[in-house]
Image (tube, helix red, strand yellow):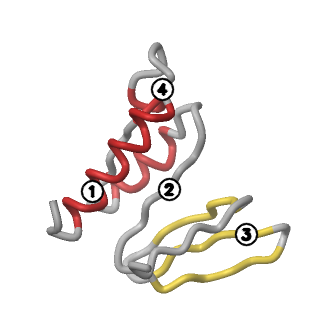
Amino acid sequence: MRGVNMIKGSEYRWIDDEDLYIAVEGEERVLAVDHDIICAGKDPLRELQERLQQLVVPAHLIGGVNVAAELDAQRAIDQGTRLAAGLLGRF
């Protein structure tokens, strides 16, 4: 309803100033994006965060990736929703 697209089974390749590069079932794709929200599971993907910081791109860790001792899907979904709404100036 709000123009958000979720792509299940994506493998993130890299992000540059204009695009997000992914692979879906082995097929390479390039997405022109304004904001990226990456749900990368419960294990930290700190390499991606570090790379984004090198590119001076804001990156936020939420849910179990941020505090792995407290895996809580409801909390992670709430944090993601609030972060996205804040980025869009709607919260």
Q: Earlier in the sequence, mark 4 or mark 2?
A: 2
Q: Nearer the viewer, mark 4 or mark 3?
A: 4
39 lies above or below 37? above
User: Which residue is identified by label 2?
Assistant: 38
Q: Callout 4: 10 Å neighbours few (<14), some, many (20+)? A: few
Q: Nearer the viewer, residue 88 or 19?
A: 88
Q: CA distance from mark 4 to mark 3?
A: 28 Å
Q: Quadrant of the C terminus?
A: bottom left
Q: Nearer the viewer, residue 42 or 5?
A: 5
Label 4: state its secondary structure: loop
Residue drawn 62% across and 61% down?
12
Q: Nearer the viewer, residue 56 or 32?
A: 32
Point out which mark residue 91 bears: none
Asked if marks 4 and 2 touch (Cβ < 8 Å), the reply is no
| x then y, percent, for residue 81 | 34, 53
User: Which residue is identified by label 4?
Assistant: 72
Identity of the amino acid at label 4? Answer: Asp
Q: Earlier in the sequence, mark 4 or mark 1?
A: 1
Q: Earlier in the sequence, mark 4 or mark 3?
A: 3
Q: CA distance from mark 4 to mark 1?
A: 24 Å
Identity of the amino acid at label 2? Answer: Ile
- Residue pushed farthest right? 26
Q: Earlier in the sequence, mark 2 or mark 3?
A: 3
User: Which residue is identified by label 1?
Assistant: 58
Residue drawn 50% across and 56% down?
38
21 lies above or below 13? below
Point out which mark residue 23 bears: 3
